[in-house]
Each structure stands twice: as C-alpha cells, then as structure tokens.
Amino acid sequence: MKKHLVRTIEEALKLLGIETMPAIEVEVPPDDSMGDLATPVAMSLSKILKKPPGKIADEIVLSITDRTIFERIDIAGPGFLNFKFTKEYLYLQLGELLKQKSSFLREDIGRGRRVQVEFISANPTGPLHLGHGRGGATGEALSNLLRAAGYNVDREYYINDAGKQVKLLGLSVFAKYQSLLGVEYPFPDDGYKGGYVEDLAKELIRKYGGKYLQMSFSDVSDIFIDYSYNTMLSCIRKELEDFGIVFDTWQSERELFRNGEVEKAIEDLRNRGFIYEKDGALWFKATAFGDDKDRVIIKNDGEYTYFTSDIAYHRKKIERRYDELIDIWGADHHGYIPRMHAVIEALGYPKDKLKVLLVQMVSLMRGGKPVQMSKRAGEFVTLREVIDEVGADTTKFIFLTRRPDSHLEFDIEAAKTQSSENPVFYVQYANARINSIFAHAREKNIPVGTLCDADFSGLSVPDELRLIKKLLMYPMVFEGAANAHEPHRITFYLQELAGMFHPYYNKCKVVSDDTVLTEARLALCEAVRIVLCDGLEILGVTAPEKM
RNA sequence: GCGCCUGUAGCUCAGUCGGAUAGAGCAACUGCCUUCUAAGCAGUGGGUCAGGGGUUCGAAUCCCUUCAGGCGCGCCA
C-alpha cells in the first residue's frame, strides 16, 4: 500500500520537474475519516521550493495521472495530502497477501548482506538473570527480524572462559569442596556465593570423593575451573533453549588465545602504529579515534586485559566478512563503546561497521515492591525462576513491548496476575479464535481451500475495511522496524491488529448461510492469521492454535 | 566533576529522519455469554508530555538550561 503511494507521488514530483527526489514520508492520519495514508511531503518541499505548502500540494494532486487506486485525494491541515484507497484496490491487495503470504509482508532490505548479532554473552559463572533475558529476547527478535528482511544473520554468544571470573568460580567451588569435606579453607573475598557453587562442589565430591583434599588450588585449578564453567555453560545453554533462543555459534575466548588470534590482533595494531609501551605495560592508542583515554592491553604483570581478547574477537568477526556487526550490550557497558569503535577504526574499517545496541537495566519488582538483588551475597532472581513463574512467552512479550533504551520495571506479580488479560494472550487469543473459526467451518463442510480467489466484494462493513487496511500496513511497519532495529514496533502493531480483530469477531459472524460472504470472511480471517503468525514468529513468541 | 540513558494519564509504557485534536494496556465504574473460544466485546472518566528558555509555518520530538532517577568514568570483567 505504501509502496504504491510512494511510487505515485514520485511520478507526480517528476512531472513537476523536481530534480532531487526527497524521501517520501508516509504516515497514518489521526482519524480514519481523513483517509488511509497521508504524506507531509508538500510541507517539507515548501522550504526548498520557497512556495506555500498548499500550492505545492495542489500541484502534486494535479500531477497525479493515474488515480485508479484512489477513491479520494484531499489536501488538509497545513498541507497534508490525504489518500483514500478504493475498495477494489484493497480487495486486490488482500488477494495478493493471501497468495504470497510472507513474501507479501516482508520487504527485502538486506539483499543477502551478512550480519552478525552477538548477544547475551554472559560470563559462565552463574545462572542468567533477568537482564540477560531482556538482551536475549531483544537479540533473538532482532535476528529474526533482520533474517525476515533478507539479511543473512548469524547469532553468536561469546564465552568469557579465559579470564579472572571463571578462575574465581573455580576457586569458589574449590573452597566449598574443601569445607564440605571438613577441611578449613578460606573462601575468596569476591567469590561466588550462590547456591549453585555448593551444588558444583557436591557434584565434584560425588565424582572424585576426597581426591583433591589437601592439595593446593594451583595444582588442580584446571579441573575445578573447567568443570565448573562447563557445567554452568550447559545450564545456560539449556535455559536459553527453554527460553526459545538458539545460537549459531558459541565463540570461546580461550580459543582466541589458543589460535594466536590475540597475538595476531596486537601485531596488527602494532603494525598500524597504534600500540606503545609505558610504565611497563602495553597500550592501545584509543585517543587517536576519539576515546577519552588510551587503554592497556597487556598489564605490567604480563597479563592481558579483558579488552585485549575483545579486540581479537571483533577483529576476527570482521575477518569473517560480515557486512555489519551488531553487539547487544547491557547499558552498564556503554562506556565501552568508544574504545571498541576506536579498535574498528584502527583496524582500518569505518566505525559504523559495528553497531552497539544498548539494552537498559531491568529492575525486578514483586507487587510494586523492588526485589533486592545482591550478586555479592548470591541473592538474585534468575531468568529460569521468572520463566517458570510467568512463562516464556509472557516474559519475552513484556521485554518486547518496550524500547531497548527505556529502563524496564518488571513486576513479576503484575505479569502473573494480569495473566488473564495479558497483552501476549490478547494477541495469541486472536489467532486461536481464528483457528477455531476454521475448525467450525470445516465441520460444516465449507471449503476453505483457495481463499485467495474468493469474491471479496461482500467485505463492506467498516470493521472489515479497517482490518484489511491494517493488514496492508504491516509491510510498512515491518520495514520501519527492520531499518530502525526496533522489534518492539512489531509488538505494538500486533496488539493493534488483535484489537481490531476481536471487536470484528464480536460483531460479525464469519460462518453463515451466505456462502459467498462466508468465503470472503474466512479469507479475511486467514489473512489476519497469516499476519499475526508472521509477527509472532519474528518476536519469537508461540502462536498456539488452541487456548 | 565529566559522559550516556530516562522523565508522557493513578500504574506500566507507545508515539515514525519535527507534522493534524498526544495514544494503548492495566487499575476504577456500567452493561453483554442458549449463538464460530467471555484470555473477548460495548461504554465512562482520566494529561502543565518534569520545569524554564530558544529554533520555525508547526516541538512530546531538535538546541540550551535547571531539577529528578538510573548507569558508567580501572593495569576489573
């Protein structure tokens, strides 16, 4: 629908002799009576052409030669052009939607370009918390969205299995192991205190008994570290699977060291002249690219920093020939962006090769009261617990009804008590109802096969025309969401669509004695179903047939 | 002190590269199941878009500033 309108206006502007074609903005008028779609293009042109918008609008209208698809073209307000489409056009497009399904709905923006989306990448030192869930839901939906938009998408999880944190986990488990077997051993100051540490220690006792008692941690660290983080990692993997998130690759940080990627990256930067030595440490000259400070990559004790392997990691990503890299980070890492962009530029690439999508913090509430979480004391609500309590679909949907950069208040109690009137059910219910209509139709032996060729002319109730128009707007919403990397636009659209379907369902009987009308209405329902399922699929939310 | 994010209805949040009379859900109140699923529908009330200046045909949106909340500013990860 938008496509046809834009084309029409562009042709008109060409006739008017406009040389540089402006981007044609298309929007939905505030009131149905004004028309179906509108454009403020005459107003934006008035500055350039130095003519009043009303006059430009007049000229545009006069230059529109082919107006068969429009019932009405009006000039309104300060210079809006309002368009109302003919029923015939709507029916034709509805038929196309039914015929082409997803390919009618999805715009090919990516044209096969390769994008990598890296998200969650939580340290394998404990269970995932709700913030990871938000990053996960966002990453998953964005990946689905971009894939649907014609990009070639890879999802990746970066495993921090090399640094201090996994070592600390191993040590924590080691300490627990000793004390469980009655040997006094100091628990590390910043050690992990969650209950899972004890579980890990118990499993090691079950496996090895007291074999590692009276030994120093440095002698057995590999066993404790590897066992602990690998176990945590498989928990994480399982948890994400239950949450409906599957990654294409799991990149190990250790492997980057093992394969010499880290050394290669340092050499690369050194050859480009962005590495120097000072105070016994090795530095990356991040200030050359707008960062506040230069950054240490090898400490004076010879250890690498976290940043160093991250450089190697991103360098490797680029070498894998992705056209675009998207990192999804918790907003608490935002200070990290300038240095990462500096790396990209230092390696000779434009910094927008890497886009960082920040996902804001989640504060957990229960019945309006904040739930205190202290990672130090090992007290926190895990993603697993939230999914078990409120369900994966609801959890995801709540995450996806917010902009990523808005702070999110997640009230477990509200998410649950709302459950009967939860937005996700509202959308899913529309789909379930449609399925039930079709079940009913089949019972009555009404053919439900080739609905795309149905005679739609019976669809003339205002609710029906509004529904059709809403369906035809999906490609526009989809395109906007994909371009802006904002899956939540799909979420809101789906709620609006369901919000049109339910009243329609209440008002109009789909299956009736009028066979022609029944067929047309079934076709409309089928189209709604197609769009609902397409959207839900992108969000990673299920579309149950029965509820 | 510097930087980033946020501030919109009682609550949780949308609001398209600046567009028309600022929206939705929840909560509150009133009705609707003998009929394709009442996880639904119909109706009612609810606003100094944090405050103040500026930019222009036009500002919730852009700029400046004040206030409030959150998060960063390591040879931690």
Image: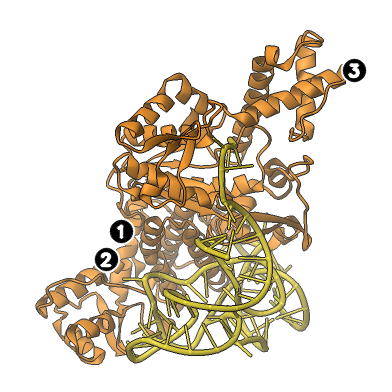
Q: Earlier in the sequence, mark 2 or mark 1?
A: 2
> Label 3 sits on what residue type?
Gly
Q: Earlier in the sequence, mark 1 or mark 3?
A: 1
Q: Nearer the viewer, residue A277 or A49?
A: A277
Cα–Cα span, label 2 and label 1: 14 Å
**Horizontal and vertical percent position of residue A475:** 36, 61
Where is B12 relative to A278, above or below?
below
Q: Residue furthest top?
A: A211
| Residue that label 2 marks | A3
Cα–Cα span, label 3 and label 2: 74 Å
A192 horizontally vs A516: left or right:
right
User: What residue appears at the point 40 percent right and 59 percent down from the top-left corner?
Assistant: A484
| Residue that label 3 marks | A182
A438 horizontally vs A288: left or right:
right
Cα–Cα span, label 1 and label 3: 73 Å
Query: Tell me, what hue is chain A?
Result: orange
**Horizontal and vertical percent position of residue A491:** 51, 60
Query: Tell me, what hue is chain B?
Result: yellow
Secondary structure of the residue carrying numbered label 3: loop
Q: Earlier in the sequence, mark 3 or mark 2?
A: 2
| Disc 2 chain ID | A
Mark toward the viewer: 3 or 2: 3
| Residue contact at pointers 1 and 3, CB within 8 angstroms | no
| Residue that label 1 marks | A96
| Residue contact at pointers 2 and 1, CB within 8 angstroms | no
